Image (cartoon, rainbow, N blue to C red):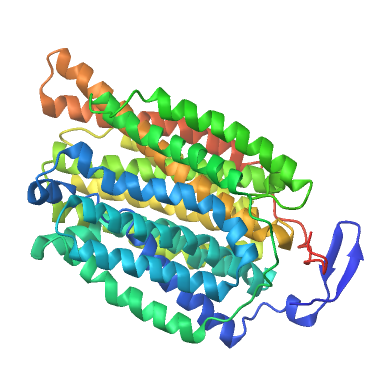
Amino acid sequence: MTTETRSTPTGSIPTDPAAADDRLAPGSKLLIGLLLVSAFVVILNETIMGVALPRLMEDLDITASSAQWLTTGFMLTMAVIIPATGFLLERFSLRTMFITAMVLFSAGTLIAALSPGFNVLLIGRVVQASGTAIMMPLLMTTVLNVVPVNARGRTMGAISIVISVAPAIGPTVSGLILSVLDWRWMFWIVLPIALISLILGAVLVRNVTEPRRVRFDAFSLVLSAFAFGGLIFGLSSIGESAEGHAPMPVWVPLAVGVLALVAFIMRQRGLAREDRAFMDLRTFANRTFTVSIILVAIVMMALFGSLIVLPIYLQSVLQLDTLSTGLLLLPGGATMAALAPLVGSLFDRFGPRPLVIPGAFAVSGALWMLTTLGEESAVGMVIAVHVLLSAGLAFMFTPLLTSALGSLRAELYPHGSAIVGTVQQLAGAAGTALFITMMSTTAAARVAAGSAPLDATAAGVQAAFLCGAVLSLLAVVASFLIRRPAEPIARTHGGH
């Protein structure tokens, strides 16, 4: 894609008339629509297993800690592969990466649907996750390359639906399926949708980026696997450790992860000077990108922490069944889906601050209200607060993602997308660990002090949301630091 540029004090910006137009070409609309549907299907599977774990424990005769690996293994695979997508999206064409992602996801879904036992099911989940890890950075990089700046907010609004709503309605979808069908149907229902996306993609997807030969640094891949895999595994084990079921001391994978992360950062800084970084961390030199990413991390912690604790509260304290729990969480997911396009349009007109600041206040207010949940709380109040939380998240996701990625130079788009995906996984694991640990330790302490199990669980839920509410105050403060991205800098003909 060649674009005429003119020099300005802040760099080179496009003067091509099409670049200033906020209308998408018909072919680009079709391409993005296909990528959005494909991404929604693959991301949905990240949280679809949560409600199904009790059924799987019974059918497959496995323990809770073993069953949890169906979710943890998925997250670990994502954590290992997503950092590599910056390199992959530079090295290979969009079409090649899309077909690879959907083949892996479809194959993993088929393996899971046919699995006779736990081990094969886990393999299927890992193969699924390999495709999922590629899809989100692929979608973001494509949007940044084909969508005019003036229309990015609306398109990123649609991406926000995928990122936030798909995980949010995963428990609802699985609850509905499990109420009438065997757990394997969670995969049989998804498989034809994945195959249709693969076939359509093979026919319709065109290349909108220019691959370039980038030297592969195997040592960076090893370091990133130990760094992000170690951190995700350690964070995911904190909840099990609090219940006395951790496979090893939690500090071991966390220490390995931290040490490997330090080594990974040092190596990337060195490779960046030779223009061959595996994950280019020069993105963090951009203030808008850095502040936005910090806020994305806090928001993802709140989202995933709530997704894990609210169902436990509804089932263990209010004594609701699986299907009712899934349906009660549906209005929140629907709220995010409904607001995302509106927020995207508002971003294009007004920029991020008028949206992110009230969104941060709404998220914080909802989390503080959730600290009051107890045995006598009305279901209607829980739904209302969850809707408020979802609305606040909707007002933050799109502006933050658009500001973060839109502030980068074009050649850094693949790396920025990879960093966003990696931070989402780490923050999701950290939020889950934080909320579960606070809930488990508080409940255990209450039981030891003589409280009834129901009272103890309610107190644990309150403690978990209190921790999230305190964390949300950081988001409120940081929201005032958000700025509209500067004029975009066009890709230079020489690469970096």
**Along the viewing direction, whichever of 355 and 14 lies nearer the viewer:** 14
Q: Residue 89, position in %: x, y?
A: 60, 64
In-image side of 22 versus 493 (left or right): left
Examine the rendering and report whether any part of residue 43 can be seen.
yes
The picture quadrant where one finds residue 129 is bottom left
Q: Residue 234, position in %: x, y?
A: 40, 32
Residue at 12 percent across and 26 percent down: it is: 453
**Along the viewing direction, whichever of 352 and 195 lies nearer the viewer:** 195
Residue at 26 percent across and 32 percent down: it is: 461
Q: Quadrant of the N terminus?
A: bottom right
Q: Residue 209, position in %: x, y?
A: 66, 72
Examine the rendering and report whether any part of residue 331 can be seen.
no
**Along the viewing direction, whichever of 235 and 339 lies nearer the viewer:** 235
The picture quadrant where one finds residue 220 is top right
In-image side of 459 versus 400 (left or right): left
Relative to residue 382, is residue 336 depicted above or below?
Answer: below
Relative to residue 235, is residue 100 depicted above or below?
Answer: below
The picture quadrant where one finds residue 295 is top right
Residue at 60 percent across and 68 percent down: it is: 92
